[in-house]
Amino acid sequence: MSRHCILGLPRMVLNWDVLFLIMEFVDRCSLLPYVQTCHTLYKAGVPHLLRVNTPIYFGKHLNVKSFCHFILGEFPSRLRYLREVEFPKKFWLRKKDTISQLAEVLRNAPFLEKVTISAAERFFEIGPELGAALREATSIRELSLDGVGDQALSVLTRMRSPLNSVELCADAVPVADCLDPNKVLASFSSSLRQLKVRWVQFENTSIQYPHVHTLSIEDDNFVPMDMLIHVFPNLQSLSITTNTGVELDEEEALHIHNENMRAQARLSWPSLNYLEGDVMLLYCLAPTCKVRCLSVWPSSSDVARLVQVCKSTRPESIKIYFHMDKLSVEELRMILRSTDVKHLSATIDAYDVNGLKDIRAYIHQLRDLFQTLTITTLYFRFIWHPTPTEWFRTEHFETENDDESSLVAPLRTPNPVQQYLHSLNVKTCMRKTADYIKTLRYAFFDMPGKPMSYWEIFRTEEGTISSFEQFSNEAGEQIVQETF
């Protein structure tokens, strides 16, 4: 007779190996009650609690003192499983013993790889121990600092970890002392692979980052093209955007464009795998290298400049996002005609389009456009955002006490445009599109109220359609990622 029967307990249906394996597929919230059922599962579950895909988030629901007591309870074994931590904007500690314990965790976690701090200056004001702990850590590979100021810069410039990925937002640096990332990140020039910066000013060109392959810049300042090429000679992916918009007259934009064109006659990248940005910024940057995928969000005023960008970069794939009322189908046709594009991802936003007649006419014009294309891949997405008075909406906001509240608007009759988009049959749309575009092989559709669908089109030697095959989401998403 088994021990379970003697004690009057139910017999285990699954053996321990299976119970341990299940932990690898369970999220943290579900895992907590699971490991609290017995000592064996608790001991086996600790590594999974600390190293699952989501970071340890030091928000309002996490008791920092209890967490530190738990993870330091079996020193140093539990520290080995800590991989990622995230500190939100309102994170704050007052008790010195808790601050010291948290610093000990950060300093001694041997495999802590990613640290995200949403309010860096506020975080380092808590106590010098936290800054010292991050400086002394040697395992961190990814660091994200928002709200960077003098204290955060002091920690960053003296960190011992060989950072591979850095994200900096320098909105806490005085305007007169614009942050130059080239100077701040000099000690990571041999290890850095990815860099994302906001509100910075590139000035120093004496330091190169030969291993950086991905660069994202969000700012209103124009970075000279020759400086970018010199500082990041082996770049493969570039994103250059602005939050406030760029206002330049035609003469100023043309002058910057021509200066960057001349600079690339002396020095240029061989090619870029991915280029993304505001059309005005890309036009002024004037890249001349071959680009595999170009991602833009134009309006009517951008068409002429975007045509220039397409002609100079010759992209194979284009990702284009636009509002239906801000870019006509004819203007879209002009953009696509400017380059020999093989793969098109088009996201059309029908927000504020209330006329059913208008959207039907727009779709009819798209049909005519499709008949002129020679693309092999189409990712087509139609989105529609309801207004507060037309659809049931819940908004969340944070109060001073870090509590969430909700505002609920009344439920109204859906907009006719939304009803029309919801009524479209995705498979029928795919079949008609494949008839219009004679070269189409892959078609991906993302329509309001419909699940994402991925299709492969098979044709006879004469080019007529012989059959269709629908991909699984996983297989389809892999093709999308490889193409765009």
Image (cartoon, rainbow, N blue to C red):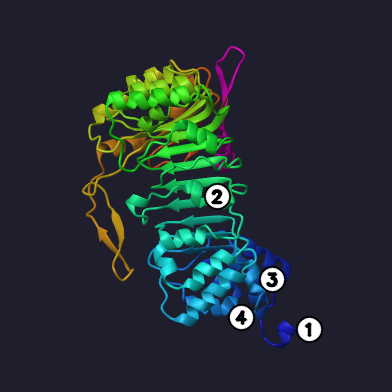
Question: Of the residues tagged 4 and 1, which is closer to the observer?
Answer: 4
The residues colored magenta run: 458-484
Circle 3: element type: loop
Q: CA distance from mark 4 to mark 2?
A: 38 Å
Q: Which residue is mark 4?
A: 73
Q: CA distance from mark 4 to mark 1?
A: 38 Å
- Residue 105 or 406: which is nearer the viewer? 105
**Residue drawn 25% across and 58% down?**
408
Q: Which residue is mark 2?
A: 186
Question: Of the residues tagged 3 and 2, which is closer to the observer?
Answer: 2
Observer able to see residue 33: no
Return the disc, 4 or 3, that comes first in the chain's sequence: 3
Return the disc, 3 or 2, that comes first in the chain's sequence: 3
- Toward the bottom, the furthest residue is 7
Disc number for residue 1: 1
- Residue 445 or 208: which is nearer the viewer? 208
Q: Which amino acid type is shown beneath numbered disc 1?
A: Met
Return the disc, 3 or 1, that comes first in the chain's sequence: 1
User: Quick check: 285 left or right of 76?
Assistant: left
